[in-house]
Image (cartoon, helix red, strand yellow):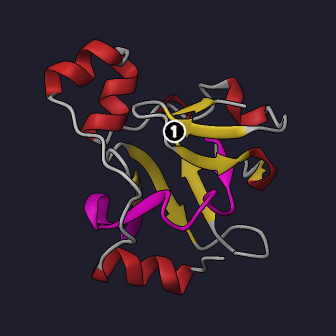
Amino acid sequence: MLNWKEVVRLSREGNVPPVKRVEKTTFEWREQLSEEQYRVTRTAGTERPFSSEMCTKFEPGIYACVCCNALLFNASDKFDSGTGWPSFNQPLTPEAIAYNSDESHGMIRVETVCNVCDAHLGHVFPDGPAPSGLRYCINAVALKKVG
């Protein structure tokens, strides 16, 4: 299980290699995604907090990347953080997520991206519940429920 120290190390030293890669042109991504999905996942945007029902739904299942269908999170690791975005305490597998150091907006944060297609998902913070202590704060438009 990942912890904050390991996430920071990965963001600075390099991520676990993905099991596969999906790469498309800007035109192909724009054709596939809605305007909001494209803005968030391909240009590192953020959806408005509390704009999705996904924050309050806790049915069993798996969440995948809206861009490439890579499996990212298990609903059993989802929790209500009260932040307005779906939150998880760990990824489905260590290689599902890639981490980038993000020093924008006058803060030091760790950006989370899909390790298969580089879609911006959100950020991870060290204030989540046990056992990992992590809070993956993820844009709902970057996810789709697949099971």
Decide if residue 80 is on the left or right side of residue 39.
Answer: right
Asked if residue 52 is positioned above or below residue 138 in the image, the reply reads: above
The C terminus lies in quadrant: top right
Q: Is residue 100 magenta?
A: yes
Q: Is residue 138 magenta?
A: no
**Residue, x 58% and y 57% (percent of image)?**
136
Q: Quadrant of residue 54?
A: top right
**Residue, x 49% and y 34% (percent of image)?**
69
Decide if residue 28 is on the left or right side of residue 51.
Answer: left
The region drawn magenta spans: 85-110
Asked if residue 76 is positioned above or below residue 90 in the image, the reply reads: above
Viewer-proximal residue among 88 and 85: 88
Asked if residue 25 is positioned above or below residue 96 in the image, the reply reads: above
| Residue occupying the far right of the picture | 59
Q: Position of residue 134 (x, y in %)?
A: 64, 69
Q: Position of residue 83 (x, y in %)?
A: 65, 47
Viewer-proximal residue among 141 and 19: 19
Residue behind mark 1: 139
* Callout 1 secondary element: loop
